[in-house]
Image (cartoon, rainbow, N blue to C red):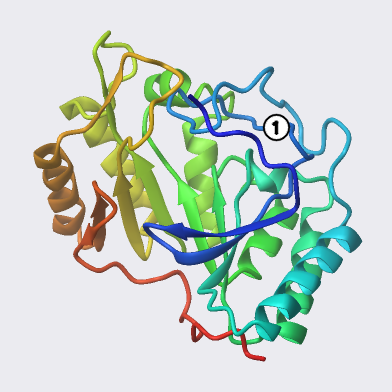
Amino acid sequence: MPLPLIDRTVYGPVRSRRLGVSLGINLLPSGMKICNMNCAYCQYGWTRGAARYRGGGVGWPTPQAVDAALSERLQRAAANDEIIDRITIAGHGEPTLHPEFEEVVARMSAARDRNAPAMPMAILSNSTTCMYADVRNALRAIDERYMKLDGGDPFTLRNLNATRVAVDTIVDGLVALGPLTIQSMFVSDLAGRMDNVGEGAVSEWLAAVERVRPLGVHLYTLRRHPPLTSLRPATPQRMREIAERVRAAGIPALVYMDGEPHSRVPETAPSRSRNTGA
C-alpha cells in the first residue's frame, strides 16, 4: 500500500536512513500529489495526471504560511530541547514546482536563521526543473541538495520515471546547478520493462553521473511495495558493483540496502551542528 499523502506543511520529524532525524517540509497542496514524474516505485503511489508546468493547480501553501509553520515548529523544538538533525524539503511530490519556490526558500532560510541557525536545510528533488534560473538560485540557497537521477538514457527515464523532460536537459541543469549529491534508485523488473540494473542502463547512467561530477552519489533500492508490482529490489551484489564503478570514476558512493549505509559520501555543503541553535 502507498503511504498516505501529507496533510500539512511541516511534518515529523521522521527518522531517515540517509538524513537522520529530519523535520519534513511539504510544499505541495495538502493531500494532493503534484509531480512531473510518475515513478513506478514512488512510495506515494501513482501520480494522477503528471504536471506539465510549474505552479499548476491550486492550494499551494503561501510563502508566508510556510514561514509561520516552520517558525512555530522550530520554536516548539527549542522549548522542548528536541534534537533535529536538519530541515528537509520533500513532501509528496516535486517541491520545485511550487509557483513561488524562490520566495519560499528565502523565507524558510530566514525562519531557520531566526530560530535555529545551526540547523542545515536540505532538499530532495527530481532534478527536472534545474534548467530554470530562479529554481537554481533557490536551490543554491539550500545547504544540502539531493538530486534524483535514475537513468542516463531516454528509455529508462521514460519507462521508470515517466517524465517528459529530456535526459540531456536534466543533466545540463545539474551541471549548471553546481555542487550536489545525486540520489539514484535501482530496481529490477520481473516483466523486464523497467529494469535499470542491466549493463546498458548502468553504463548510460554512469556516463551522465560523470558529466555532472557530483560531490557524491547515494544508491538505494526498494524498501516498500511499489505501485508497479513487478518491480523488485536490486540485489546487494549488484548495488555494490554499481557503487564500485562510481568510485572507479573518482566519485564517492554510498549504498543503502537495509537502512545502513557503507562507505562515506560528503554532504552538499559543510554540515551545521545537530542542535537547534536555541
Indicate the quadrant where residue 89 lies.
bottom right
In the rendered image, the residue lying farthest to the front is: 80
Expressed as whole percent of the image width and height from the top left, the position of residue 27 reads: 73, 49
Residue 179 visible in the current orientation:
no
> Mark 1 belongs to which amino acid?
Ile
Residue 273 in the image: above or below residue 13: below
Towards the viewer: 84 or 230? 84
Residue 229 in the image: above or below residue 137: above
Residue 190 in the image: above or below residue 172: above
Indicate the quadrant where residue 92 lies.
top right
Residue in the picture at 13% in, 56% down:
248
In the rendered image, the residue lying farthest to the top is: 191
Residue 205 in the image: above or below residue 20: above
Indicate the quadrant where residue 214 lies.
bottom left
Expressed as whole percent of the image width and height from the top left, the position of residue 265 reads: 29, 67
Residue in the picture at 59% in, 86% down:
118
The residue at which mark 1 appears reads as 34
Count of numbered badges drawn on the protein: 1
Q: Is 177 left or right of 16, judged from the image as shown?
A: right
Q: Is 6 left or right of 84, judged from the image as shown?
A: right
Please rate how many residues cluster around mark 1, counting C-alpha atoms within 10 Å: few if below 14, some from 14 to 19, many from 20.
many
Q: Quadrant of the C terminus?
A: bottom right
Residue in the picture at 24% in, 12% down:
190
Q: Secondary structure at mark 1?
A: loop
Expressed as whole percent of the image width and height from the top left, the position of residue 125 reads: 56, 48
